[in-house]
Image (cartoon, rainbow, N blue to C red):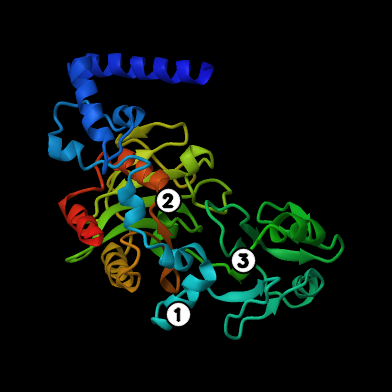
Amino acid sequence: MKKLVGSLTALITASIEAKRTSGKGMLSQLVEISRLRRPPNCVSPSEYYDFNLSDNQLDWAAKSSYLGWRSPVITDLQNPAWHALANDKLNFYGLMTGLGFQVPHLYAIYSQSRRFFGNTPVFSDTDSLADFLRNRCPYPFYGKPADGAYGAGNILCTAYIPESDSLCMPSGSQISIEAFIKDHLIRSRNGYLFQQVMEASTGMTELWGNRLSTVRIVVALCEDGPRIMLCEWKIATGSNIVDNFHDGKTGNLLALADTSNGCIQRIALPNGGITSESSVAHPDTGVQLMGTAVPNWNAMRELVLTAARAFPGLRLQGWDIADTTTGLIPLEVNLVTGRTAYNHQQFMQKGLFDESVKSTWQALRN
């Protein structure tokens, strides 16, 4: 009951604020909420205000292009038979390698089920893996779960320290091999990957330092071919070994880029704010963000538009592309879920359910 009262209070407050800023009366707001709450949009009352859909400058076509967290459109566009290619990095690497794309180089795999990946060494027990880490593993290496998300479970190790039987991090801190196995490997259901550390390209390094700041490109695979819907630049800061924004919790930055030229238009800050102020600069390099263009944007764009056609069962795809010293590397393709669709639409201030996506969805249902 307390939670319900809190939610109602928040909605009333949002409605009052919407009336103050847009002039739209509460009854008019309720009518729009009622219409947008129906399928296929399924926009909840709270999402209506989060997306600022009371704005009178938006026509109905623009408002009805938004999809709520629970919209059936999002799930209908993602064939479950194709999920494993997006959710499992080994499956993804294998397919992309076969299609001629460059992927991260693997040193080894830990897999209790003895997964196979060409000539890559596979360790199914922790003793043999520990021996590999002590005696044969190339350093530095980057580790990540095969089915991980949001950077959870990732690690960057620069060296093995025999005196303490530990792995050394870039910060100088250490973790014992025993603790590493306990904390990172045991929970990796589909395996853990040990891969070569990728170095950012010269263009990326000059902007954000020598760290990977990948570009998330959302593609809609429509009836008339793939279309880029959104470009988000995940910009790492400080000593972070991942570039995920994660609602600002990591301290990283997230930039919205123009899909036509790759130039930054809007920035999400760690404190939760969104700004287009020209004064915002990277905290480590001092480079101003607004107007800065994604290096190699045209090549990155073409790579994604080509690769997207390899996943016909996934009609909404989120590609993470790394610009490295050895070229552009697709790190993963992600399912666009209700949560990510919500975040994308709120950030770009535009709905994903445009006429092209709508016609594609309707064709799939017929």
Q: Disc 2 to disc 3, how far (Cα)?
A: 26 Å
Instruction: Give percent across and percent down for residue 73.
Output: 30, 50
**Who's the residue at 22% across and 25% down the image?**
54
Residue 24 image offset from top left, x and y in percent = 18, 18
Marked residue nearer the N-terminal end (2 or 3): 3
Asked if residue 163 shows in the view, the reply is yes
Residue under label 2, please give it.
234
Real-space Cα separation, disc 1 to disc 2, in angstroms: 25 Å
- Type of amino acid at the residue the image marks with label 2: Lys
Q: Is residue 345 above or below residue 32?
A: below
Amino acid type for the residue under numbered disc 3: Asn
Nearest the viewer among 96 and 163 is 96
**Pointer 1: what residue?**
97
Q: Quadrant of residue 183?
A: bottom right
The reply to whether callout 2 and callout 3 are in contact (CB within 8 Å) is no
Going by the image, does 214 lie left or right of 291? Answer: right
Dot 2 crowding, Cα within 10 Å, few <14, some 14–19, many 20+: many
The earlier-in-sequence mark between 1 and 2 is: 1
Q: Which residue is mark 3?
A: 190
Seen from the viewer's position, the closer of residues 143 and 75 is 75
| Percent x, y of residue 254 | 40, 45
Q: Amino acid at mark 1?
A: Thr
